[in-house]
Image: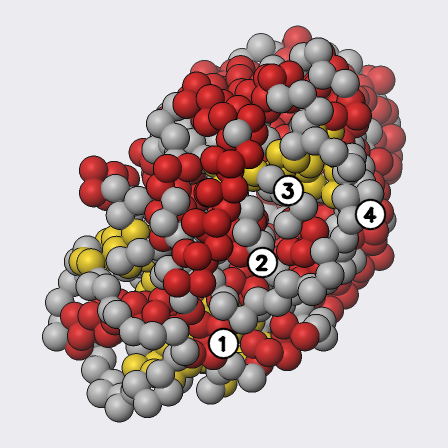
Amino acid sequence: MPPALVARFGEAVALHQGGRLTEAEPIYRQVLAAYPRHFDSLHLLGVIYYQRGEREAAVQQIDAALAVNPDVAAAHNNRGNALKDLGLANEALASYDRAIALKANYAEAHYNRGNVLRELKRDPEAVESYDRALAVRPDYPEALSNRGSVLKQLGRYHEGLASLDRAIALRSDYAEAWFNRANALAALKRHDEALASCDKAVALRPELAEAHNNRGHALEKLRRFEEAIEAYDRALALKPDYADALNNRGNASKELKRFDEALADYDRALALEPDHADAFFNRGIALAELKRSEDALASFDRAIEIDPRHAEAHFNRGSALLGLRRLEDATESFRRALALKPDQDHLKGIYLHARMHLCDWRDFDVQCAELNADVANGRAATYPFQLLSCASTPAAQLMCARTFVVNKCPAFADPLWRGEHYGHARIRVAYLSADLRDHPVAYLIAGMFERHDRSRFETVAISFGDDKPSAIRDRLKGAFDRFVDANKMSDREVAKLMRELEVDIAVDLNGFTDGSRPDVFAYKPAPVQVNYLGYAGTLGQDYCDYIIADRFVIPEKSRADYAEKVVYLPESFMVNDIARKISARTPSRAEAGLPEEGFVFCCFNNAYKITPDVFEVWMRLLGQVEGSVLWLSAGNAHAPKNLCREAQARGIAADRLAFAPRVPLNEDHLARVRLADLFLDTLYYNAHTTAADALWAGVPVLTRPGATFASRVAGSLLNAVGLPELITASLADYEALAVALARDPQRLAAVRQKLARNRDAGPLFDTGRFTRHIEAAYTTMWQRAERGERPQSFAVDPIKQARP
């Protein structure tokens, strides 16, 4: 070109580099008018199209340049960028590959190639491309940042964090690197640090919606849900069509029990992105919380239809099916989740537990051993409750509980109670439970609530369960000074209410059972917090001060395996209601589905408590006691079928097993229990309420205690009712005593007569006596707190008094 036109082209390049595109473009065209095959003008005009967002024109223009000279790496790289933005990832990849073939040490092309491989979900290859870019240019912050993000996706969190830290060291004002760093820290569960990284990103680029979204996620993980919603709102103000932020906002609302708001957010996210699998997944969780199990199932099904490898959706689909009592379908969902993501928190435990409901014992011992090994290694393989029904130890159950608490409900850094002294005339005791309804816990404890000494105690009920009308619900509502329906309140709202009410002692009647709200206690709203009755084990929490027990369920040698300090009541830890009714009419054996003659062994425990080792003994009993039957709870539609099959495999005819269907009224169930001759306890998770039912109905209970709280409850009840001779030391003794009682009617009659005497005269069913004991325990706890003393294990002295 003539020197004047060369100079003119140089002027265009300078303008272009200065961002003055509208001034550079006509000069490139001027050059092309004189020299239509001028490669640089053709190429750079294509770059201008790209910079203006005209991606298709950019590709056409760069193609024209490449027709002149196909061997310029930069043109292939820029063509790849335009194709990538057009959503043509594979074509873009081919362009980057051509650029690299022409110039092997082309750092930008390796970097861009990594970006398109990320879009194609080829993450390991993306890391390799970033590594090649960094081999050429070690000080490439964008490559380091994106590499760190991909490593996080691959589960290589520490490597990802190191890569992001290098990016930030090179460029401290790199907002994207800061929020990618937050993602890596969140994956490592270092949520405070993640929040700090998000704050830095937001300070650098307040307009970056993604940074506000990530900040909301960090706040959500820190259980600061109100602040999380504010962060998501900022993200949405910047980017109203941000489906991920809407989905996340719904999650925060869900945690605050604002389910209608959560569902509205999920629906808005799905209106924007109809194939947003996570929004369907989270919508399903919210619907499940609302007990809309069928609707929840439909949402999980849609999430799986969109993403068949969504392991969490398969898991929660299984949980929804459990709620619908579709146990076989639930088990299949858990199995699929396990195949996709075997290390998913709590999955192994719930899968085994679902199969135990079905009495499906294939590979049972192997799965129990694997579960215990995971627990010992600090893995969150099971919810604590599901370990109770497996062979385990108090130490294992403590480890399991602590792992759960650390991951799900650690203590909040800002406790609501901070050492204040209330100085109440009456000790204020709050009972928190999802079971203040038609539930075994309610039937056990209602009489105690009614018998509290109102001159010394003020009682509050905080109910997390539904408010379905029933006689027991009405009775409970009348038993307290104040009854709070907290079903729709957030955990923090409940905790703040307790602090405002100046509750002295908060009693957790749920523990880790269905409907529990451990975060309420994690706020430390009361000076004294107590684990009682609902959960037969330790809660593993520093913020739970005491567990109420007796010397049988928690022997002195086992105290170290409980996070709480142990309060020993003098007879049994279990409260019973002396006012429980038994229907006057006992049904006939035929009406109950029993043969007219023959010894009746029974066990009305839930099917998941029955394990192969005890069932083996039961079948040998049927073989040794001619004409005898085993009467079990029908429970669900599948367990009886499997139990009959297991019986036949052991040489026992299926008709030797009888199954009792559920009856609407508890007093009718107690009346039919009278037809049994001997209650046979399960091993690892004893009969609790069902043992009390049998003893109240006059049926002796035979047990073999283990080492854990859950395996020693029936023994506690037998001691309190004066029948320690029914507590055996081994399975062999258990079997021998069962046979002896079944073959010796006079010996069994003597035991039943002793039970009848002790039931009415002994302490087990003396509700007034028990209430005075637990009040003495509360008083000591309260006095220690008033004196500023730390919780300490202690024993309550027995109080002698007549039955009210």
Left or right placement of residue 788 versus residue 101 in this view:
left
- In the rendered image, which quarter contains the C terminus? bottom left
How busy is the neighbourhood of tag 1: few (under 14 within 10 Å), some, or many (20 plus)? many
User: Which sits in the foreground, 731 or 684?
Assistant: 731
For the point 44% across and 63% down, which residue is it? 760
Mark 3 lies on residue: 676
Nearer-N-terminus badge (2/1): 2
Q: CA distance from mark 2 to mark 4?
A: 24 Å
**CA–CA distance between discs 2 and 1?**
17 Å
Whole-angstrom CA distance, mark 3 to mark 4, is 13 Å
Dot 1 amino acid type:
Ala
Q: Amino acid at mark 2?
A: Pro
Ranked by sequence position, the earlier of labels 1 and 4 is 1
Nearer the camera: disc 1 or disc 3: 3
The residue sitting at the front extreme is 746
Instruction: Write down the residue under mark 4.
Output: 591
Q: Residue at x 53, y 15 (%)?
A: 366
Dot 4 amino acid type: Glu
User: Is residue 632 among the parts visible in the rendering?
Assistant: yes
Whether tag 1 and tag 4 are in contact, CB under 8 A, the answer is no
- Mark 3 falls on what kind of element? loop
**Residue 461: numbered disc:** 1
Query: What kind of element bears circle 4?
Result: loop
Query: The N terminus appears in which quarter of the rendering?
Result: top right
